[in-house]
Image (spheres, rainbow, N blue to C red):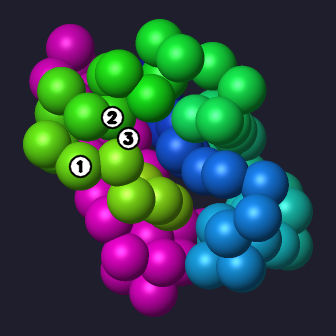
Amino acid sequence: MQAKLALYVTPLCGYCHYVIGTIKELGLEVEIRDVMADQKDLEDLYKARNRTTVPVLRITDNGEDQWMPESRDIVEYLQGLKN
């Protein structure tokens, strides 16, 4: 079973748009979560990382969450899924 992916973003974040562009380019299925529009997503992000900076990719696999910050690291990870 493939991991479930969710990207935590804000609409004004250039790094977030960079990652979203890569997701579209690669044709990946990633849930986009706008932390400015959904208080629960913001709280989940803060609880997991003690900060609210974005973008952050949440990778859920076998009930375990891994939180990956840094747009370049996220893009590299996503590109690796297509190889």
**Which quadrant of the rendered structure holds the C terminus?**
bottom right
Q: Which residue is mark 3?
A: 58
Identity of the amino acid at label 3? Arg
Q: Is residue 77 left or right of residue 63?
A: right
Mark 2 closeness class: few <14, some 14–19, many ≥20 residues within 10 Å: many
| Residue 60, above or below 55 | above
**58 drawn magenta:** yes
Q: Which residue is mark 2?
A: 45
Residue 51 numbered tag: 1
Residue at 21%, 19% in the rendered image: 62
Give the x, y percent position of residue 29: 72, 41
Q: Is residue 49 left or right of residue 41?
A: left
Q: Secondary structure at mark 2?
A: helix
| Residue 2, above or below 83 | above
- Contact (CB < 8 A) between labels 1 and 3? no
Residue at 68%, 69% in the rendered image: 13
Residue at 43%, 51% in the rendered image: 57
Mark 1 vs mark 3: in front = 1
| Residue 67, above or below 61 | below
What segment is highlighted magenta in the picture?
57-83
Identity of the amino acid at label 1? Arg
Separation of marks 1 and 2 at Cα, in angstroms:
7 Å
Instruction: Determine which quarter of the picture holds residue 16.
Output: bottom right
Give the x, y percent position of residue 71: 48, 78
Give the x, y percent position of residue 39: 53, 17
Separation of marks 2 and 3 at Cα, in angstroms:
9 Å
**Which quadrant of the rendered structure holds the N terminus?**
top left
- Contact (CB < 8 A) between labels 1 and 2? yes
